[in-house]
Image (cartoon, helix red, strand yellow):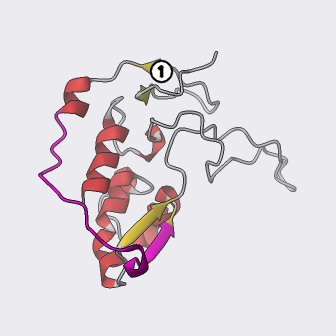
C-alpha cells in the first residue's frame, strides 16, 4: 500500500512494524489552532545562532529536566519546555532534524552482538512531507502531532 505524500495525518501504529494509513484528521482541532497573531522574528541570516537538534534525542534522557518526563520526553511538547534553556545559551534559531513520518524499521543492519534489527533513528527516509511524526506527540489523538508541532513553531 502506498500512502499519499500529501496526507495531513497518519493513524497510530499498533505494532513495531511501520504500517501507517492516512486518515482524515479532525480539521476543527487543526484549523482552530491559535497562532496568537505572532510575527516572523525578522532576523537576518548573518545574525542567526543556529542550534540543530533531534526532537527525540534532545529531551529523551532522564536528566533533560523535562516535566512529566514519562509523557513529554522525546516529544514536541518536551522540546517546547527546553526553549528557555536554548534562549539562555543565546540560540535564536532551531533547525530540527527530520520531524516527518518515516519508517523507523527500514534499516537493513543488525546489532553485531544481539543480531536484532537496528532502527532508523534519524529519519532521513521521510515518507510523507506534511505529516509530523506521530511518535513525537505526547498524546495519541490523530491530530496531536500537528497541533504540538504548530505550538512548538509558534513559541
Q: Residue at image x 35%, y 45%?
A: 138
Q: Nearer the viewer, residue 71 or 98?
A: 98
Q: Residue at image x 29%, y 41%?
A: 147
Q: Is residue 2 positioned above or below 93 on the image?
A: above
Numbered circles on residues, count: 1
Side of 40 where 124 appears, left or right? right
Q: Which residues are magenta?
A: 32-52
Q: Position of residue 155 (x, y in %)?
A: 24, 60
Q: Secondary structure at mark 1?
A: strand
Q: Position of residue 6 (x, y in %)?
A: 47, 27
> Would you say the magenta stretch is mainly helix, strand or loop?
loop
Side of 97 where 29 appears, left or right? left
Q: Residue at image x 47%, y 65%?
A: 58
Question: Which residue lies under the disc numbered 1?
Answer: 22
Q: Position of residue 55 (x, y in %)?
A: 47, 57
The picture quadrant where one finds residue 50 is bottom left
Residue 45 appears in the picture as rendered: yes
The picture quadrant where one finds residue 80 is bottom left
Q: Is residue 131 positioned above or below 93 on the image?
A: above
Q: Is residue 48 magenta?
A: yes
Q: Nearer the viewer, residue 131 or 63?
A: 131
Amino acid at each position: 500500500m502506498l500512502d499519499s505524500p500529501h496526507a495531513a495525518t497518519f493513524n497510530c501504529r499498533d505494532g513495531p512494524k511501520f504500517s501507517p494509513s492516512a486518515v482524515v484528521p479532525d480539521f476543527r482541532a487543526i484549523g482552530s489552532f491559535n497562532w496568537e497573531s505572532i510575527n516572523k522574528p525578522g532576523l537576518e541570516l548573518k545574525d542567526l545562532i543556529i542550534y540543530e537538534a533531534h526532537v527525540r534525542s534532545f529531551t529523551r534522557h532522564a536528566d533533560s529536566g523535562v516535566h512529566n518526563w514519562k509523557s513529554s520526553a522525546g516529544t514536541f511538547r518536551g522540546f517546547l519546555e527546553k526553549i528557555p534553556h536554548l534562549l539562555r545559551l543565546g540560540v535564536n534559531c532551531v533547525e530540527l532534524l527530520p520531524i516527518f513520518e518515516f519508517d523507523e524499521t527500514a534499516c537493513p543492519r543488525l546489532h553485531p552482538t544481539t543480531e536484532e534489527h537496528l532502527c532508523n533513528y534519524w529519519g532521513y527516509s521521510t515518507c510523507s512531507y506534511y505529516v509530523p511524526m506521530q511518535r513525537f506527540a505526547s498524546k495519541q489523538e490523530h491530530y496531536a502531532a500537528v497541533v504540538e508541532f504548530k505550538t512548538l513553531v509558534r513559541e
